[in-house]
Image: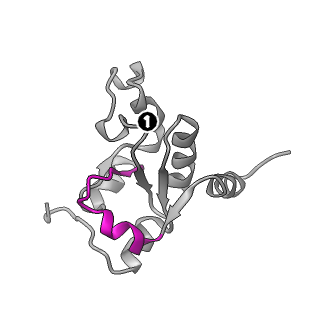
Amino acid sequence: MTLSAHDLIAAARAQILELAPHELAPLLGSGTPIVDVREPDEFADGHIPGAVNIPRGLLEFEVDGHPAVAGRTAEELSHRDRPVVLYCLSGGRSALAAEALKRLGFVTPMSLAGGILGWEVAGLPVARPGSW
Protein backbone atom coordinates (compact mmCIF):
# COMPACT_ATOMS: atom_id res chain seq x y z
CA MET A 1 0.00 0.00 0.00
CA THR A 2 1.37 3.38 -1.01
CA LEU A 3 0.86 6.27 1.39
CA SER A 4 0.76 9.97 0.62
CA ALA A 5 2.24 12.78 2.69
CA HIS A 6 -1.33 13.56 3.77
CA ASP A 7 -1.70 9.98 5.05
CA LEU A 8 1.54 10.21 7.03
CA ILE A 9 0.51 13.53 8.57
CA ALA A 10 -2.94 12.20 9.50
CA ALA A 11 -1.35 9.16 11.16
CA ALA A 12 1.07 11.41 13.08
CA ARG A 13 -1.75 13.67 14.26
CA ALA A 14 -3.55 10.64 15.67
CA GLN A 15 -0.50 9.93 17.87
CA ILE A 16 0.35 13.39 19.19
CA LEU A 17 -1.13 16.36 20.99
CA GLU A 18 -1.90 19.43 18.91
CA LEU A 19 -2.26 22.86 20.48
CA ALA A 20 -4.43 25.65 19.12
CA PRO A 21 -2.70 29.04 18.90
CA HIS A 22 -4.59 30.35 21.95
CA GLU A 23 -3.31 27.34 23.94
CA LEU A 24 0.30 28.01 22.97
CA ALA A 25 0.25 31.77 23.62
CA PRO A 26 0.31 31.44 27.46
CA LEU A 27 3.38 29.17 27.22
CA LEU A 28 5.54 31.91 25.64
CA GLY A 29 8.22 32.85 28.11
CA SER A 30 7.33 29.99 30.47
CA GLY A 31 10.45 27.98 29.78
CA THR A 32 8.65 25.51 27.51
CA PRO A 33 10.87 25.10 24.45
CA ILE A 34 9.23 26.26 21.22
CA VAL A 35 10.94 24.87 18.14
CA ASP A 36 10.35 26.12 14.60
CA VAL A 37 11.07 23.16 12.33
CA ARG A 38 10.98 25.19 9.11
CA GLU A 39 14.07 25.94 7.06
CA PRO A 40 16.36 28.80 8.20
CA ASP A 41 15.18 31.17 5.46
CA GLU A 42 11.56 30.62 6.50
CA PHE A 43 12.46 31.26 10.14
CA ALA A 44 14.32 34.45 9.18
CA ASP A 45 11.20 35.79 7.44
CA GLY A 46 9.29 35.68 10.73
CA HIS A 47 8.78 33.36 13.68
CA ILE A 48 7.00 33.04 17.01
CA PRO A 49 8.83 35.17 19.61
CA GLY A 50 11.22 33.08 21.67
CA ALA A 51 11.24 30.15 19.23
CA VAL A 52 14.47 28.47 18.16
CA ASN A 53 15.05 27.12 14.68
CA ILE A 54 15.91 23.44 14.33
CA PRO A 55 15.00 22.39 10.78
CA ARG A 56 12.94 19.23 10.41
CA GLY A 57 15.77 17.51 8.56
CA LEU A 58 18.12 17.86 11.55
CA LEU A 59 15.71 17.40 14.43
CA GLU A 60 16.37 13.77 15.33
CA PHE A 61 20.14 14.28 14.96
CA GLU A 62 20.12 17.17 17.44
CA VAL A 63 18.48 15.07 20.16
CA ASP A 64 21.50 12.90 20.89
CA GLY A 65 24.36 14.89 19.38
CA HIS A 66 24.77 12.88 16.19
CA PRO A 67 27.95 13.40 14.14
CA ALA A 68 25.75 14.90 11.37
CA VAL A 69 25.40 17.98 13.63
CA ALA A 70 29.02 17.96 14.85
CA GLY A 71 28.05 16.11 18.01
CA ARG A 72 25.87 18.97 19.29
CA THR A 73 22.74 18.38 21.30
CA ALA A 74 20.19 21.18 21.11
CA GLU A 75 19.40 22.42 24.63
CA GLU A 76 15.70 22.58 23.70
CA LEU A 77 15.78 18.84 22.95
CA SER A 78 17.96 17.71 25.85
CA HIS A 79 15.14 16.89 28.29
CA ARG A 80 12.84 14.15 27.12
CA ASP A 81 10.68 14.50 30.24
CA ARG A 82 9.77 18.16 29.54
CA PRO A 83 7.08 19.37 27.14
CA VAL A 84 8.28 20.75 23.81
CA VAL A 85 6.17 22.55 21.21
CA LEU A 86 6.99 22.32 17.52
CA TYR A 87 5.58 24.33 14.66
CA CYS A 88 6.04 24.87 10.94
CA LEU A 89 4.15 26.77 8.25
CA SER A 90 0.82 24.94 8.42
CA GLY A 91 1.24 22.10 10.93
CA GLY A 92 2.23 19.12 8.76
CA ARG A 93 5.99 19.05 9.29
CA SER A 94 5.57 19.78 12.98
CA ALA A 95 3.09 16.91 13.40
CA LEU A 96 5.61 14.54 11.80
CA ALA A 97 8.37 16.02 13.97
CA ALA A 98 6.33 15.61 17.17
CA GLU A 99 5.60 12.00 16.27
CA ALA A 100 9.32 11.38 15.70
CA LEU A 101 10.19 12.89 19.10
CA LYS A 102 7.53 10.74 20.73
CA ARG A 103 9.16 7.66 19.20
CA LEU A 104 12.49 8.91 20.58
CA GLY A 105 11.06 8.90 24.11
CA PHE A 106 9.84 12.46 24.55
CA VAL A 107 6.94 12.44 27.01
CA THR A 108 5.05 15.49 25.73
CA PRO A 109 5.96 16.59 22.21
CA MET A 110 3.24 18.89 20.85
CA SER A 111 2.52 20.45 17.47
CA LEU A 112 0.93 23.83 16.82
CA ALA A 113 -2.26 23.19 14.85
CA GLY A 114 -2.30 25.39 11.76
CA GLY A 115 1.36 26.30 12.16
CA ILE A 116 2.52 29.89 12.02
CA LEU A 117 -0.20 30.62 9.48
CA GLY A 118 -2.83 29.76 12.10
CA TRP A 119 -0.87 31.75 14.69
CA GLU A 120 -0.97 34.84 12.46
CA VAL A 121 -4.68 34.39 11.65
CA ALA A 122 -5.32 34.36 15.41
CA GLY A 123 -3.66 37.79 15.59
CA LEU A 124 -0.74 36.62 17.72
CA PRO A 125 2.71 38.26 17.53
CA VAL A 126 5.37 37.33 15.01
CA ALA A 127 9.00 38.39 15.32
CA ARG A 128 10.08 39.80 11.97
CA PRO A 129 13.43 41.12 10.72
CA GLY A 130 14.05 44.50 12.27
CA SER A 131 11.86 43.71 15.30
CA TRP A 132 14.56 41.73 17.12
Q: Which residue is mark 1?
A: 58
Amino acid type shown at disc 1: Leu
Point out residue 110 in the picture as x, y percentages from the top left corner.
Answer: 48, 55
Q: Is residue 69 above or below residue 23?
A: above
Query: For the point 50% across and 44% down, which residue is it?
Result: 107
| Magenta-colored span | 20-37
Point out residue 62 in the picture as x, y percentages from the top left corner.
Answer: 39, 32
Query: For the point 32% across and 47% down, which residue is it?
Result: 53
- The quadrant of the picture occupied by the C terminus is bottom left
| Mark 1: secondary structure | helix
**Residue 121 part of the magenta segment:** no
Q: Is residue 24 above or below residue 7?
A: below
- The quadrant of the picture occupied by the N terminus is top right
Q: Quadrant of residue 66?
A: top left
Query: For the point 68% across and 51% down, which residue is it?
Result: 8
**Residue 33 part of the magenta segment:** yes
Point out residue 56 in the picture as x, y percentages from the top left corner.
Answer: 46, 43
